[in-house]
Image: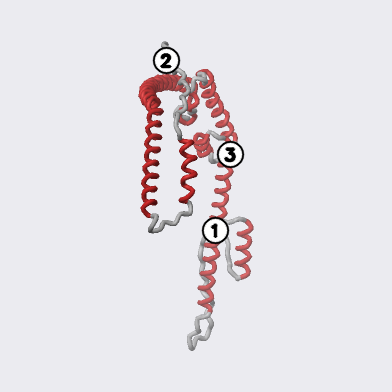
Amino acid sequence: MEERLELVVSPIPEMPKLISNIDELKEQLEVSLKKYQNLVVTEDGIKDAERDRANLNKLKKVIADERIRQKRNFYSPFEEFETKCKNVEKMVDETAKAIDTQVKAFADREKEAKRLEIQALYDQNIGPYAKLIPLEKIWDDRWLNKTYKLRDIGNMISATRISADLHLRQVHELNSEFEEQLKNKYFETLDISAVLAENTRLAQQKKLMEELKEKELLRQAEEAVAVEAEAEIKTQNEPVAIGQIKAEEPELITIAFRVSCTREQLKALGEYMKANGIKYGRA
């Protein structure tokens, strides 16, 4: 807007003081009203009291009406000026809002154009990671600011590709059996520290599962031995038939089972069998 718009207001001359006898009237009332301060109205004085009350109320109304009239006269020019100012303010506000809408629309078009340029930079610099590291994953809203140069944004995208190359080599050099899972973790977080922590977690998890499996196999083996031992004891305690001359030898039961355990656990199992007279050997 080349034309300069400016509000010019002429100074308002100081309003002259209103000339009245309000001060003298106040002094007269202070003297006249003293007699009413501790007044007790009696039958003889009721008419005078009613008359004085009416006169005082009438005086109060006259004073109030004049005060309101003078106030209206004083404020009337200002109220007219105030109304005109508010109307102009509304016009200015509506125009400013219309301009603001256009300014924002222009800024949005600029940002969209820059977004397309950033997409092109991404396609040029991300290398083989377009599907694994989408633009949205590394996007920074500040890139759309005018202060961010396209050259710097391109360098940041290139740095992402270089970091991915380096970190994937680190993952491969771990020689971890969980390499594929670790790669997935990297592309999920883009954080090599999180990948190393995940490798430790997976290794600990596998060790725990193996220990639990060994304990379960040992429990099953001990349970099988106990069942066979109980069956043997039951057979030995069966009563001998009357007339039986020769005691029958306990029936031997042969079973084959397979256990998976540590050397210490296998040694303990063998000692248990020896202590209970259980014969065992390779099949």
Which residue matches tag 3? 196
- Tag 3: amino acid: Leu
Q: Earlier in the sequence, mark 2 or mark 3?
A: 2
Residue 10 in the image: state x and y as whole percent: 45, 17
| Circle nearer the viewer, 1 or 3 | 3
Residue 238 in view of the camera: yes
Q: Is residue 95 left or right of residue 205?
A: left
The CA distance from mark 2 to mark 3 is 67 Å
Quadrant assignment for the C terminus = bottom right
Crowding near pointer 2: few (<14 within 10 Å), some, many (20+)? few
Q: Residue at x 46, y 35 (%)?
A: 22
Q: Earlier in the sequence, mark 1 or mark 3?
A: 3
Which residue matches tag 2? 5
Crowding near pointer 1: few (<14 within 10 Å), some, many (20+)? few
Along the viewing direction, whichever of 95 and 225 lies nearer the viewer: 95
Instruction: In the rendered view, tell whether residue 232 sits above or below residue 52.
Output: below
Along the viewing direction, whichever of 8 and 20 lies nearer the viewer: 20
Q: Quadrant of residue 191?
A: top right
| Circle nearer the viewer, 2 or 1 | 2
Instruction: In the rendered view, tell whether residue 205 sits above or below residue 235.
Output: above
Instruction: In the rendered view, tell whether residue 264 sits above or below residue 158.
Output: below
Tell me whether the residue at label 1 lies in contact with that at label 3, contact meaning CB atoms closer than 8 angstroms: no
